[in-house]
Amino acid sequence: QSALTQPASVSGSPGQSITISCTGTSSDVGSYNLVSWYQQHPGKAPKLMIYEGSKRPSGVSNRFSGSKSANTASLTISGLQAEDEADYFCCSFTRSTTYVFGTGTKVTVL
Amino acid sequence: EVQLVESGGGLVQPGRSLRLSCTASGFTFGDYEMTWFRQGPGKGLEWVGFIRSKTYGGTPEYAASVKGRFTISRDDSESIAYLQMNSLQTEDTAVYYCARVGKVAGVDAFDIWGQGTMVTVSS
């Protein structure tokens, strides 16, 4: 099972919006509405930001939103803030009853 | 407070075994599927495997990279999930995390994570 493809880095200025893509196949991202997104600050455990493609857990800012089209999922951060600087990983359930993560994207706030 | 705490990490020689524990508190452990992940130094997240709740058979699934070497089990009476790692290799060096699959709580994703435990495989 190959890792889902994410851009290595994305950057933006405070207040701007950025979008991170997560490309898989018809055997994972395209098969289920079970893509989730995780934020990870250095030395910390990952934190769930989006689940089932577009849902936000309680406590997560509404500046974070998710979507999916065919085999590609996306995470959009609007109104970028300094605290959003972190690594972001997507994850999908697969037809093989396993999970696969994305390669990870480093978000830099300029 | 809902919490997961991993333990059991450390330095181990190649070919040896190690067992990690993931102790849960603040929720009904037996209702939830539990998952293990790892993250090598400077690398991304890798799913290792999960174990279903007893309601769904209590059976595990594994990533191809660890199948046959790693075993996931659970003790619902103690609220602990285990990761037994055998025939360890240098490439197994990583921080190991456990997480809850929050499906029962309406969140079909890894909603609660532990802080991680470091495993170093080296001679």
Image (tube, rainbow, N blue to C red):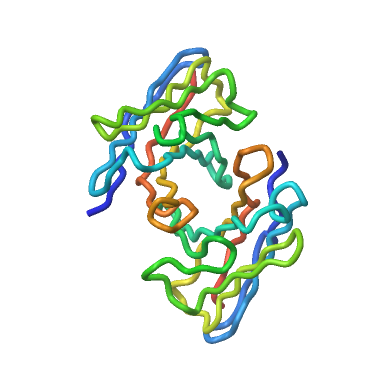
Q: Residue furthest bottom?
A: A15
The number of numbered discs placed on residues in the rendered structure image is 0
Q: Residue at x 48, y 71 (%)?
A: A84
Quadrant in the picture for residue A34 = bottom right
Quadrant in the picture for residue B106 = bottom left
Residue B97 makes an appearance in the image: no
Q: Position of residue B111 (x, y in %)?
A: 42, 54
Q: Position of residue A103 (x, y in %)?
A: 65, 51
Residue A83 makes an appearance in the image: yes
Q: Residue furthest front?
A: B55
Q: Residue at x 52, y 84 (%)?
A: A79
Q: Is residue B87 left or right of residue A10?
A: left
Q: Position of residue A30 (x, y in %)?
A: 73, 56
> Which of the pair B61/B4 is nearer the observer?
B61
Q: Is residue A98 left or right of residue B111?
A: right
Q: Is residue B108 above or below residue B75?
A: below
Q: Residue at x 38, y 22 (%)?
A: B19
Q: Is residue B55 above or below residue A7?
A: above
Quadrant in the picture for residue A7 = bottom right
> Which of the pair A24/B46 is nearer the observer?
A24
Q: Is residue B36 left or right of residue A7?
A: left
Q: On the rendered image, what quadrant is the N terminus of chain B found in? A: bottom left
Q: Position of residue B122 (x, y in %)?
A: 49, 21
